Image (cartoon, rainbow, N blue to C red):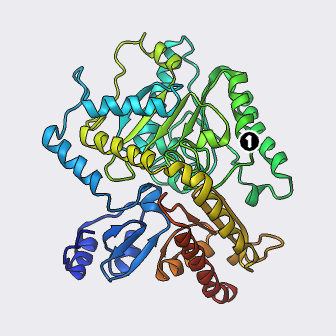
Amino acid sequence: MHMPRNYDIAELRRLDIAHHLPAQADWQEIENLGGSRIITHAEGCYIHDGDGNRILDGMAGLWCVNVGYGRDELADVAAEQMRELPYYNSFFKTANPPAVLLADKISSLTGGRLPHVFFNSSGSEANDTIFRLVRQYWKLKGEPKRQTFISRINAYHGSTLAGVGLGGMKAMHNIGGDPIPGVEHVRQPYWYNEGRDMSPEAFGTACAEAIESKILEVGPENVAAFIGEPVQGAGGVIIPPANYWPQVEAICRKYGILMICDEVICGFGRTGNMWGHETMGVKPDIIAMAKGLSSGYLPISAVAVSADIIKVMKTGGDFVHGYTYSGHPVSAAVALRNIEIMEREGLVEKVRSETGPYLAKALATLNDHPLVGEARSVGLLGAVEIVADKATGARFGGAEGTAGPMVRDICIANGLMVRGIRDSIVMCPPLIITTSQIDDLVGIIRKSLDEAEPKLRAF
């Protein structure tokens, strides 16, 4: 492990308040707290802050550090590529070796079904690319009225204008005015919160039928695509009933609309298969990916597209879209080596056969806790629903959002980084996590629930 630098943490916190604007944050709250928590170094599944705390990273950074921290070979390949070709664009009928080789590798990871790859720097940019590409595809195909995307309430597809529009989070829509037009939102397949009066199968069917109803309401001739995360990550690790996605695919095929899977969180082994859509048993026309593509070591994202779509796109001349860092050679080189590490160490298979099932069993032990309404997981994606009444599912404070942040903060104080989403604690640890570390993770959640209970009952 590299020795951490001796930072002046108090000065960094002062500068953080004075100049640094953190993402998705209440800046006044951070000032009131005396500045952000300063993360100084990390190794394996652990992060360290400037106050000397060692924290088990139950979120793999932001759903992304799949191969864990401290991989020297990723640093080495980045340095080697920087010396050889630190940057060049893909605008001027040019390409670079790592980008071309990575496109080939991604194509092979889709089984050749999605052989064409467009690079960007973030998941948000990937979904912007999809938004423009799909609308141009239908225009070139002679159906220019097909403009409307169907997405889901509480979906997350990024923070750009197109990403926020495709997403279905009201809090994000409220910042900057109404979302962009041309996106319709339907109910989400969130069984615990919205469907417990039905069997999971009946609820899955009802949620799929909501998509068909929306298609008929808008007019099939006006619908371009349906977009969805195989598992809604930022929405709260919402795992749909098993029959949901196959029905969604059948509906898309029935009306001739494109099916898009946002694999930004679910891709690269997270659900126990290379892709979340494999876990759900469907075959999309387009996928977005980012995060686990490079394990977060450098910014990169990609869009993989079917041959049929690109055949049509090639009839239209220039696709006037792209970014300065599309196909960045250093990011692409790191992503290639990251995938090599995953394959060499059998991480996807490990999640599928060992650590994913182990996490499911470990989380199930929390079901006897008086605050736990449901503990659920798929692969190494998990969530614990916190309730005031197990029988009714009633929330603390009479509404959602009281318990999640409180239990999250207690978990972090106890040495586990998790995320609080409404009244859920969600987790997404590095794919290298061991079974003993999973025991630690679940043990800290139980301890934190115990500590939170008297405070929550006092509301």
In the image, farthest residue toward the left: 83
433 to the left or right of 94: right
| Residue positioned 30% across, 35% down in the render | 326
Q: Amino acid at mark 1?
A: Tyr
- Front-most of residues 203 and 276: 276
Residue 398 can be seen, yes or no: no
Measured as percent of width and height from the top left, residue 205 is found at 80, 41
- Residue 30 % position (x, y): 37, 74
| Relative side of 449 to 202, left or right | left
User: Which image quadrant for residue 31?
Assistant: bottom left
Q: Position of residue 34 (x, y in %)?
A: 33, 81
Query: Where 253 falls versus 419 (above or below)?
Result: above
- Would you name the residue on which mark 1 appears? 244
Locate the N terminus by quadrant.
Answer: bottom left
In the rendered image, the quadrant that contains the C terminus is: bottom right
Report the residue at 50% width, 82% height from top.
414
